Image (tube, rainbow, N blue to C red):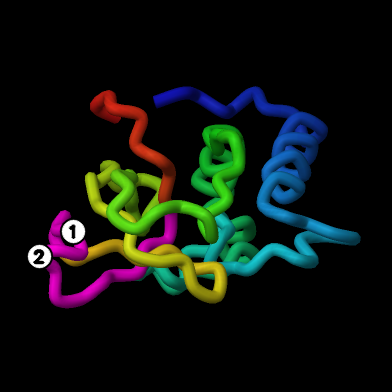
Amino acid sequence: MKNYDNVTAKELHNKKMEMLNYLGRNGERCNGVYCINCPLDNTNNGKNISCVKLEAEHFYEYVKIIMEYELKSKVDWENVEVNTRILVRNNIEDEWRKRHFARYENGKIYCWVDGCTSFTAYSTVRWTYAKLYNGEEE
């Protein structure tokens, strides 16, 4: 784990703005970014901590999330084919899990349950974070 004790306020701010811009920020603060798509909001990850509370009460974790956020090429989830292999997780600290893409709806990504495909699955599960599987172990 990296040590972020020497991160300056300017570095943190710049990295946070880069992350929010990547997530679709328009205007001031984080306007245009859905909380569920932001790694700083943990209300949907079982922690029940908003980004404001995270910054105030868990500052080191807040810094870590921002500094370790990876900017990937943006995926057009509306055009991803059903059963495409992807990696998913609900918390930024969780291990990536292999799943098959089911659908993208209202800004949320759904996969077939338990790694199944549309041929064998009976339901879908919503995930917070997703990325295309590149054929290598992540």
Write down the region rendered in magenta.
Answer: 114-129
Instruction: Identify the residue shown where x is 41% and y is 50%.
Output: 130
Amino acid identity at mark 2: Thr
Instruction: Give whichever of 14, 60 is nearer the camera.
Output: 14
Relative to 98, is 32 on the left or the right?
right
Q: Is residue 126 above or below residue 135?
A: below
Relative to 52, is 112 on the left or the right?
left
State yes or no: discs 2 and 1 in contact (Cβ < 8 Å): yes
Instruction: Identify the residue shown where x is 53% and y is 38%.
Output: 64
Say which mark, if any, is on residue 120: 2
Residue 52 part of the magenta-drawn span: no
- Callout 1: 10 Å neighbours few (<14), some, many (20+)? many
Judging by the rendered image, the residue that carries numbered circle 1 is 117
Q: Position of residue 99 (x, y in %)?
A: 24, 51
Q: Is residue 95 above or below residue 109?
A: above
Instruction: Give whichever of 119, 96 is nearer the camera.
Output: 119
Q: Position of residue 66 (x, y in %)?
A: 60, 41
- The image quadrant that residue 63 belongs to is top right
Residue 127 part of the magenta-drawn span: yes
Instruction: Identify the residue shown where x is 28% and y is 70%.
Output: 125
Instruction: Identify the residue shown where x is 28% and y is 27%.
Output: 135
- Residue at the right extreme? 27
Instruction: Give whichever of 44, 86 is nearer the camera.
Output: 86
Q: What element does badge 2 sit on?
A: loop
Instruction: Give whichever of 1, 137 is nearer the camera.
Output: 137
Q: CA distance from mark 2 to mark 1?
A: 6 Å
